[in-house]
Amino acid sequence: MSAANSDHSPDSHDVDHLGHEAHNHGSFKSYMIGFVLSVILTAIPFALVMTGVLPTQATALIVMGFAVVQIVVHMIYFLHMNSKSEGGWTMLALIFTIIVVVIALSGSLWVMYHLNTNMMPTHDMTQMVG
């Protein structure tokens, strides 16, 4: 058996991967766009918190909104996630993960709210006779 016909020759390795989808690892330009967007999406909430120009609840909602946008930026520009990568399986796994997290968080908040409402009675302390 010669090296040219062997399954482990360097040429056969290249041929095996010709049919596979090419992986896009991004360009310098796409990494710089992602970096600049990340810096902007970090600086704005930081400035809002440090200056205190908005009420606390509004600031918290805006910071959370910027956090969600920054997650999307990181997934697109740094993790190279799109509907075409890995035949769409990475996007499907991400969607499933998001659904599970939303169900777990909303269910936990719902349970904690109702436990607090039902377990903590509101007593009028003035009616208690000592």
Image (spheres, rainbow, N blue to C red):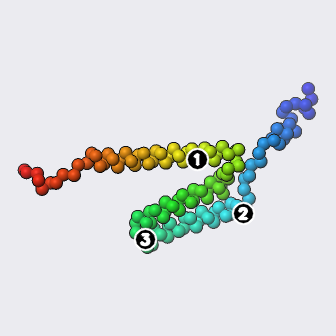
Residue lying at the far top in this picture: please name it.
Answer: 1
Q: Could you say whether the residue bearing mark 2 is in a helix, strand or loop?
A: helix
Q: Residues within 10 Å of mark 2 (few under 14, many from 20)?
A: few
Res. 3 visible in picture: yes
What amino acid is at disc 2? Lys
Q: Residue furthest left?
A: 130
The amino acid pointed to by label 3 is Leu
Number of labelled discs? 3
Q: Which residue is mark 1?
A: 95
Callout in the foreground (2, 3)? 3
Residue appearing at x 47%, y 69% in the figure: 48
For residue 54, the mark is 3
**Which mark sits nearer the N-terminus, 1 or 3?**
3
Residue 10 can be seen, yes or no:
no
Circles 2 and 1: CB atoms closer than 8 Å: no
Label whose residue precedes the other's in the sequence (2 or 1) = 2
Q: Nearer the viewer, residue 28 or 91?
A: 91
The residue located at (49%, 63%) in the rendering is 63
At mark 1, the secondary structure is helix
| Residue at the image point whose x is 68% and y is 60% from the top | 31
Q: Pointer 3: residues within 10 angstroms few (<14), some, or many (20+)?
A: few
- Measured as percent of width and height from the top left, residue 70 is found at 57, 59
Residue 74, numbered circle = none
State the quadrant of the N terminus. Answer: top right
Residue 10 position by quadrant:
top right
Q: Is residue 9 above or below residue 29?
A: above
